[in-house]
Amino acid sequence: MTNRYNELLQKQKAFLHAQNSRSADSRKTALRRLYLSIRKHEQQIIRALQQDLHKSELEAYSSEVGIVLSEISYALKHLSGWMQPEKVRTPITHWGAKSYTLPEPYGVVLIISPWNFPFQLALSPLVGAIAAGNTAIIKPSELTPRTSAIIAAVAADAFDSDYVAVVEGDADASRQLLELQTDYIFFTGGNAVGKIVMEAASRWLTPVTLELGGKSPCIVHHDASVKTAAKRIAWGKFMNAGQTCVAPDYLYVHEQILEVFLAELKLAITELYGKDPLHNVNYTHIVNERHFDRLVRMQDGGNLIFGGQYDRSRLCIAPTLLLTEDWNHPIMQEEIFGPILPIVAYRDLDEIMNNMKAQAKPLALYIFSEDRSVQNKLTETLSFGGGCINDTVYHFTNPYLPFGGVGASGMGAYHGKHSFELFSHRKSILKQTTAFDLPFRYPSMKNGLSWIKRFLK
């Protein structure tokens, strides 16, 4: 099996050496082919997402298909500008020279994608890889097999495998692909596998982007617009049944507004998913039995105040709210990645900030407050990948904002131009004149040192 993958790698390297993906026209043509293939298979993609995760057509299109199409359109519009050399200043010590940077592709990019947004998180990085002139090997998740199969069909319809290839298979396929000497690795998933990816990359000193997760906090201060906060938190937390790396993982709610906020949050959940979410056709299910059982165990010993219903035969768990003050409870020890939301009442903002500083750096932070000084204090003092003020999750869909983690929540950022930059190496070029030659850099010049000291200070 490894020999087959190595053969694929060599074919992609040959494709690169033939300069088949370097020109702006070839990159734009490839992106248009991808766009048309997605459009052609759109209903099959939506059907696969429904079969794998019970996603509604609205959620499948808005959070998966539409985002990828938007990324392609954005790249097509701006690609020619991104590819231009970027002039930089040249110091006086280099008189007569001009300096610039030139973006070039890394080469063969290995993209390992997860199951929670299986289409989007496989193909959004691919858009950046193609825009930057790379070839790509995609390993989609085996936990969403129907979506993985349609990703393979979309890619095969748009590209030859020596340009873009999809490798289906289990964790062993990922392991074998990681043994290859690719030129860049882009991984989205959990911390445990992220460490394995980084260790594999170290063998060849391969650059790597890790899009991980963590326990992303959400703070609802006493001056928040309570009704709006409740609805936006309910939407951001329970879309995809909470199986979202940037979902609010736990809430800090100021004690002054706790009761009224909880009332509004319950109303918002009911408005979004009805009184019987287990049978709501627009509500996503849990990916498999292992994750389902893990989430059910997380509820044990918690102070249940809403929801809690589940149906193992359908792998469905209702939106669930727990009140807790126990940081030793299992639900506060690991990323939840499901439709369970623990809520902690707080009185002092500095106290909870100190507590958050003691935790691993999260992928996202959400702040609900009308006080600009509170907003600035939290965003400027706490370290996190990205986030929102008075909203949740929406920063992820802005192509002008880089998306990525920090520390335990990941490294590297992409989306829009940032995807192009991520998958491009910036070569530094200095073009020197031959019309004259500055003598003071040569050891033979008398008083050369004194001249250098004048300039280099």
Image (cartoon, helix red, strand yellow):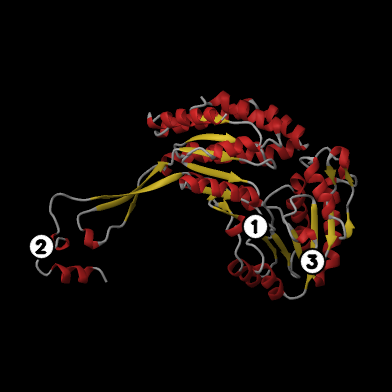
> Going by the image, does 78 lie left or right of 177?
left
Q: Position of residue 60 (x, y in %)?
A: 71, 37
**Residue found 28% across the figure and 58% down from its top:** 90
Which SS class for mark 3?
strand
Q: Quickly name the residue at label 3.
A: 344
- Residue type beneath disc 2: Ser
Q: Quickly name the residue at label 1.
A: 364
Q: 456 above or below 246? A: below
Query: Picture quarter containing residue 111?
Result: top right
- Residue type beneath disc 1: Ala
For the N terminus, which image quadrant? top right
Name which of mark 1 and mark 2 comes first in the sequence.
1
Q: Quickly name the residue at label 2.
A: 444
**Residue found 65% across the figure and 32% down from its top:** 169
Query: Picture quarter containing residue 15?
Result: top left
Name which of mark 1 and mark 3 comes first in the sequence.
3
